[in-house]
Image: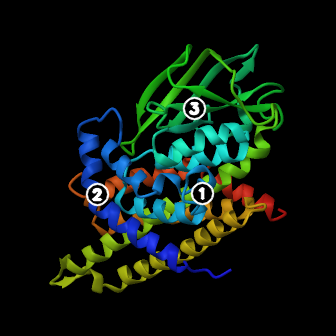
Amino acid sequence: MAMVLNEEQQLLKESAEGFFAEKAPITQLRKLRDNKDETGYSADLWQEMSEMGFAGLMVDEDHGGTGFGCVGAGIVAEAMGKTLSASPFLASSVVGASVIAAAASEEQKAALLPAIASGELIVTLALDETSKHDPEGTALKAAGGKLNGLKTFVPDGHVADKVIVLARTSGEPGDRDGLSLYLVDKGASGLIVDRVISMDSRNWAKLTFEGVDAAELLGAEGKAMDVLEPALDRCRIIVAAELLGVAQQTFEVTMEYIKERKQFGVPIGSFQALQHRAAEWFGEIEVTRSAVLKALQMADAGGDIRWFASLAKAKASKTAELATKEAIQMHGGMGVTDEFDLGFFIKRARVLQHLFGDYNYHADRFAACSGY
């Protein structure tokens, strides 16, 4: 499998980068932050993204999508990482579509996937209950046909039309078996939604379930992890692609800066110490690019992708951390001030680093998959 994009994928990359540079520059995120926008993204932008086919990249053509798969979604995610474009793309078009495609019945897929692909329906996943990613630690209970418990850090949970909820039907927190997926409608009786503005200026949500009806089951009861884990791995790789976009953009911005910023009468980019650091930074980005593209390709090929997903997520998390720190330091520390855009990138990177498992989670999982 060639470690390059084919002609069709390259065209998608050029189209996505041009679209977000023009339609969703970082100034748009500043405006959303300053206005404390309740939606958290531009509805007009989301409509245009849907018309471009971005909302249906992870949905097959039989269900109204474009069928570009993980590689296509990763290309768009990387482009979004470069401009920090805010939209329900990750929550609905990636996570929601992936979980429904993996767990839902044919009737449910026929009802939900075309609406997701068109951007008309926003679906998100309510997964974690603490500050750490731990699906198997789920304590939210589904008993007597009702859901009771708490979910935190739900992406776009305040605007989602439907929420996929991971709940425990049997066993104790920590058990892999006994977990089930339920689909809950927005405004369901007993569902309390608290909007949370995260450090990355995006809207997330805390969801409290107080006797919410658990009528619509996705997949087999008690066996959610069998379908959820492979779906999550696909999402993790696409999160890694967005982190790659963050790392690439901060690198490009910083290289331009050190070529122009002068000290002692010469550009600071001429200093050998900064050149060595920039070379290491560039090298780490390229290694990450290879890891992410290979993981995206393997995800589309099918099979067990745990090793590739954890490698991509762990590597991208470390590279984004290196990139944002170096960007701030090479700007002389003032890069963190609101005058510059770099502060937005470091905040988005830190959120994505923890989403669906941080570096430590995936380094441990990668080692386990490698036989250690």
Q: Which residue is mark 2?
A: 23
Q: Kindly identify which numbered label has been placed on residue 49.
A: none
Circles 3 and 1, Cβ within 8 Å, touching? The answer is: no
Q: Nearer the viewer, residue 304 or 357?
A: 304
Tag 1 secondary structure: helix
Ranked by sequence position, the earlier of labels 3 and 2 is 2
Question: Which one is earlier in the sequence, the residue at label 3 or at label 1?
Answer: 1
- Residue 314 found in image quarter: bottom right
- Give the residue at x 73% y 39%: 105
Depth order, front residue of 283/163: 163
Asked if labels 2 and 1 touch by Cβ distance under 8 angstroms, the answer is no
- Compared to residue 371, the image places residue 193 above or below, namely above
Res 61 label: 1
Judging from the image, what secondary structure is the residue with disc 2 in?
A: helix
Task: Name the kind of residue labelled 2 in the image.
Answer: Lys
Residue toward you, 187 or 225:
187
Residue at figure coordinates x 63%, y 36% from the top left: 127
Q: Nearer the viewer, residue 253 or 170?
A: 170
Please, is residue 212 above or below residue 158 in the view? above
The x, y position of residue 295, in whole percent, is 65, 67
Q: Quadrant of residue 42?
A: top left
Q: Position of residue 301 (x, y in %)?
A: 71, 67
Image point (55%, 48%), residue name: 354
Residue drawn at (44%, 70%), measured in percent from left and top?
13
Q: Residues within 10 Å of mark 1 (few under 14, many from 20)?
A: some
